[in-house]
């Protein structure tokens, strides 16, 4: 249960930023609050963002802008996202608990939380998404995941392009937290491989991506071996570090086959499995 002494509801971004940087530097931002509700701590104050009008999905030129307070369910059911990247965003969101949960959980909260078990972060990384912050402005999601300053996430931006991408998550049962999540992108630059649920937040397997891009003989198997070696894995109640490491090799091979199929059928909607 979420308990607090004060619930602060700023009505402007200026006011919200002033609260988090001066008067309430440790107060959590409430953007859905689905995970905060699981804690037992009583907060002196929480900062609710519902009055900032950040719940929207709009097409802006060659990009989609998703407001930080937009629910997961709204993104999951948005018509254009059923086809963007073969429907990778609905695919990432549909296994997350139930519809009731996804009607409360927000995209901004999901991204800013940087959860290791996130399905949505690897999907957004594969789409080369950017984020817009109140103070720091626009940056890539990949850079944001290591950004350590107190700031307010305003929106997520995604290009309207149709890249060859794939997402796969390994979980013990449907709607359970994944113990490994992988995403892959293939474009004119080459291949990009992202692995999360290690159980840390998704990161790019840089050396493995370079090997796959080079296209040497047995590159897929080699990329899997290199990714398993270059990334850091830990054990928890869902899976051991050694199991995650072994399954990363399998995951990369499966992702490569899916991305290759998507690339061979450019202009069609790939059959995601």
Image: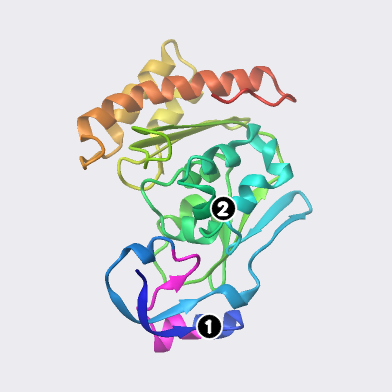
Q: Where is residue 205 in the image (x, y as percent from the top left)?
A: 39, 36
Give me the residue at 69% from left, 47% from top: 78
Q: Is residue 54 magenta?
A: no
Side (left or right) of 264 relative to 95: right
User: What residue did someone put label 2 on?
Assistant: 72
Q: Give the camera-side residue of 26 and 159.
A: 26
Give the SS element for disc 2. helix
Q: Position of residue 106 (x, y in %)?
A: 53, 59
Q: Does the magenta stretch include residue 27?
A: yes
Q: How crowded is mark 1: few (under 14 residues within 10 Å), some or many (20 or more)?
A: some
Report if the CB atoms under discs 2 and 1 are less than 8 Å apart: no
User: What residue did someone put label 1 on?
Assistant: 9
* Residue 7 falls in image quadrant: bottom left
User: Is residue 232 positioned above or below 211 on the image?
Assistant: below
Side (left or right) of 90 relative to 255: right
Question: If you read the primary sequence from the N terminus, does the residue marked by circle 2 or circle 1 appear first?
Answer: 1
Extent of the magenta region: 18-33
Give me the residue at 46% from left, 43% from top: 119
Q: Give the camera-side residue of 184 and 57.
A: 57
Quarter in which the N terminus is drawn: bottom left
* Residue 242 falls in image quadrant: top left
Label 2, label 1: how far apart the Cα atoms are: 22 Å
């Amino acid at each position: 249960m979420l308990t607090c002494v004060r619930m602060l509801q700023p009505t402007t971004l200026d006011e919200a930023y002033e609260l988090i940087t001066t008067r309430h530097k440790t107060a959590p931002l409430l953007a859905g609050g689905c995970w905060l509700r699981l804690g037992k701590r009583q907060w002196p104050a929480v900062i609710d963002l519902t009055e900032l009008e950040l719940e929207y999905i709009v097409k802006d030129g060659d990009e989609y802008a998703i407001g930080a307070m937009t629910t997961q369910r709204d993104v999951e059911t948005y018509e254009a996202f059923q086809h963007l990247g073969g429907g990778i965003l609905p695919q990432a969101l549909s296994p997350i608990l139930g519809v009731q949960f996804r009607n409360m959980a927000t995209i901004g909260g999901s991204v800013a939380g940087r959860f290791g078990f996130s399905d949505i972060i690897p999907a957004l990384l594969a789409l080369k998404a950017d984020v817009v912050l109140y103070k720091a402005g626009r940056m890539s999601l990949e850079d944001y995941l290591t950004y350590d300053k107190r700031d307010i996430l305003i929106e997520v931006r995604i290009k309207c392009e149709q890249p060859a991408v794939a997402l796969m998550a390994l979980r013990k049962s449907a709607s359970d937290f994944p113990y490994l999540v992988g995403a892959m992108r293939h474009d004119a630059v080459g291949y990009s491989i992202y692995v999360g649920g290690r159980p840390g937040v998704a990161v790019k397997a840089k050396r493995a991506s370079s090997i796959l891009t080079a296209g040497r003989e047995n590159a897929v198997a080699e990329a899997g071996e290199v990714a398993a070696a270059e990334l850091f894995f830990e054990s928890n109640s869902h899976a051991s570090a050694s199991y995650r490491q072994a399954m990363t090799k399998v995951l990369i091979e499966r992702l490569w086959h899916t991305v290759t199929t998507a690339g061979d059928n450019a202009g069609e909607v790939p059959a995601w499995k």
